[in-house]
Image: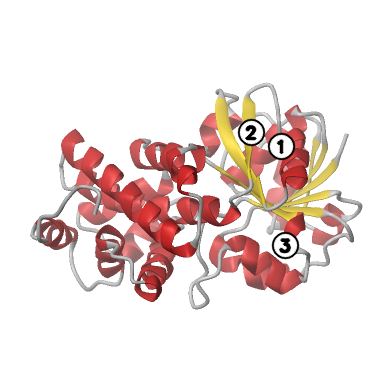
Amino acid sequence: MTRVAVMGAGSWGTAFALVLADAGHDVRLWARRPELAEAVRRTRRNPDYLPDIALPPGIRATADPADALDGAEVVVLAVPSQRLRETLRDWRLPEGCLVVSLAKGIEVGTDLRMSQVVAEVTGIDPDRIGIVTGPNLAREIAERQPAAAVVAASRGDVARRLQAVCHSPTFRPYTNTDVLGCELAGATKNVIALAVGMGTGLGYGANAVASVITRGLAETARLGEALGADPHTFAGLAGLGDLVATCSSPLSRNRTFGEHLGRGLDVAEATARSLGVAEGVQSAESVADLGRRTGVDLPIVEGVRRVVRGETTPPEAIRDLLARDPKPERA
């Protein structure tokens, strides 16, 4: 049995805590709001995010970060990507612990991946930092539907250790040492899902959706190659798998947010209708910036960025994409 602190009681943090408890570990789930922690303790459910899912007894909720982190051998960070830096500054992580990031985003202003933010803020050796990514729709995982994922860490032994910690009867993790590629794929797929959602909101069908998913994967792979990622990563669970799930499911916050935009809502209105954070809204700026810095053409990402900034509308963005000069598919 491993003591694990899951720092963040949103839908994905709660679902991952359930996976860890099912795997036989002692899990402490930190909630930012004391009233949520108390509700989880009292009802054995998360009333704000997964109200109909009973949580196993191996999970104990707390609003005190020091209590959650005390004695933790593994610390799981389940806070939104753009809040990770400021939140980490307030915590003292246990000496020698392994750290796992669940957030899928690129930090605005620095263009850093989440593992890089963790290393910079905490001073922890990057070799002790891992990520969990892949098709991770929280509700399906919390319902114990079969799911596979990727545990990535720069050192194979660390990846295998974390793999063992989160391998439950219904959650099958695979290892990968390409942290860069896995994080880049996780962040970029959220932006592509916004584009798919916009098309769906505009009433477009399967041809349009498949086209955006496929060309979005091409953009991700081009950017990954320029930054030094392993190209095989983008054909696996962290790349294609996560992209398909996020773009195809109505459970996806980013796809749903994009649908709101496609139906004519602005970002503020779409945000008001959303439960949880659609990471792609802010990551669009950072991913587009990475493309400009590396000289990689990212037309779908750039179109989403301009819609989010209010510089264009979804119909205009689609029109601009279709009007681009024709080229070979592999370009």
Q: Is residue 152 left or right of residue 63?
A: left
> Which residue corresponds to mark 3?
126
Q: What amino acid is at disc 1?
A: Gln
Q: What amino acid is at disc 3?
A: Pro
Above or below residue 199? Residue 129 is below
Residue 206 place in picture, x, y as percent: 20, 34
Residue 277 place in picture, x, y as percent: 48, 56
> Which residue corresponds to mark 1?
163
Which residue does the image show at 41% across and 55% down from the upper left?
A: 188
Relative depth, front residue between 290 and 99: 290
**Badge 3 density bin: few <14, some 14–19, many ≥20, Cα 10 Å:** some
Residue 222 visible in the displayed image: yes
The numbered mark, 3 or 2, whose residue comes first in the sequence reads 3
The numbered mark, 3 or 1, whose residue comes first in the sequence reads 3
Above or below residue 179? Residue 242 is above
The numbered mark, 2 or 1, whose residue comes first in the sequence reads 1
